[in-house]
Amino acid sequence: MPPIERIQIPHLLALLLAQGDRFGLQSKHLTTILGMISASDADLQASAVTFLGALARSHLAALQHEHIVRGSEILARGLRNAALSAASTKTGKVALVELDGSKCRDFFTVLNIAKTYTAEQAHHMHVFSVVLVWLRLCHTRPDPGLSVELKESLVEYCMRVLDQGMCKLPDDRPIPAADRMLLYAAIAEAVRVLDVLCSIDLTIAPRAGPAIKRVLTRTDLRHHVLFSALRFVLNHSAVAVFDLEAAAAACFGGPMRDKFGDSVVAAETLCFVLDNADALRRAGILSKYFPNLLKCIAWSPRTFFGEALELLPALMQPSNNVGRCHSILERPCVSTSLEMMASGDMAKMTAGSHMAGAFFNYILRDEGGFGGTIDRLSDLHAAFLPFAGSARTAAAAS
């Protein structure tokens, strides 16, 4: 066989990933591929790390215990070895800083900002991008093969990322949009990594608890970040002290009141609820915050029709069936109320009318707990009758 040129290796790895499992070639060549991650060639490192992450996600049978042990050691080195020194360019060294602009401290993470990164730092970020899927692979094995070195490196690393994520710029200036998206992604990934680590080693949960609580107190984070923290609390509240009610309120309470019209937030919320319905039901969160969940559906009834059908069985419980049925029947009124609130018609209707204000407070309530509906339902319907022709209201009613 002629020697393989370096430029061909990324293409061969892609072919090996797509078809190599048919002939047992993935496992046969994995030791060589793991060696590429430790090589000095940045392009080979990137291709090999990508291959390893894809293999852990979709081809578990190819990974033997010795591969997992060695892979864990290599990933641990990749996280630890990125230097704090800045990259050099023709115009001089490029500054490496924290999100707030201060000098980089402790050790390098994905949240350290520079215009140009060294190959070592780029490899470091690539390694962090596959760590979560690697941990999930370890968690599924009877013998995880997770080295103490990788476990401790990840705990220290994720705690530093969460600490970096809590920083604020001087004079309360907003973080630039590009850095803000990186911040959200890094915090969410760090929380998910800690979540899996705690499932593997329960002693980590009390150490990670304070950092998770700080994430839940931030009001400027995207909902998918908060949901990562809430999932951590749901999974590990038995071994660490968490205020589950405060965590649920941060995700489903008051903050949701003004975000029903954000299609991204609504989709993230409904997907999270459907993925974690059993845990949320056991914790009493669904029974308390279902009115806010129904607002997401009432604002976009056709978009989330499928999610609504999946969600309804999770909402229904013997102790609250009457209240849920009334809430479902009131959904057209919720759609109308949300439209009126968005257009300003609600403020006009409630001006000087305590009854109208009471109607809207009931229909747009954030929490459940009412056994039935209001006494003057006919008056409510009469007040909303002029808006019955709305397309959104008609879709909610159908």
Image (cartoon, helix red, strand yellow):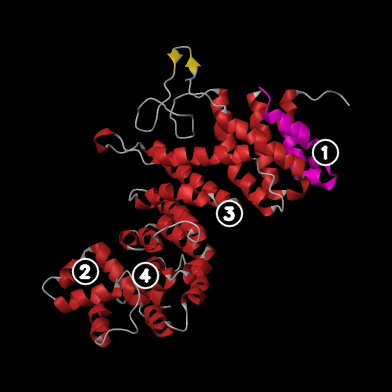
| Residue at 68%, 27% in the rendered image | 38
Q: Amino acid at mark 1?
A: Lys
Between circles 2 and 3, the one closer to the viewer is 3
Q: Is residue 22 magenta?
A: yes
Where is residue 95? Give x, y as percent.
Answer: 41, 21
Magenta region, residue range:
11-40
SS of the residue at dot 4? helix
Find disc 3 in the rendering and name its residue.
199
Query: Depth check: 208 or 309 in front?
Result: 208
Residue position marked by numbered label 4 in the rendering: 392
In the rendered image, residue 258, in percent from the top left (x then y), is placed at 30, 60
**In terms of sequence position, does the residue under pointer 2 or pointer 1 come before the other?**
1
| Between discs 4 and 1, the one toward the N terminus | 1
- 292 versus 10 height, above or below: below
User: Which amino acid type is shown beneath numbered disc 3?
Assistant: Ser
Q: Are marks 3 and 4 in contact (CB under 8 Å)?
A: no
Whether the magenta-drawn stretch holds residue 294 is answered as no
Q: Amino acid at mark 2?
A: Met
Pair 3/1: label in front: 3
Residue that lies at the very extreme toward the left in this rendered image: 352
Report which quarter residue 63 is drawn in: top right
According to the picture, the residue beneath numbered tag 2 turns out to be 346
Residue drawn at the location 75% of the way across and 44% of the way down: 65
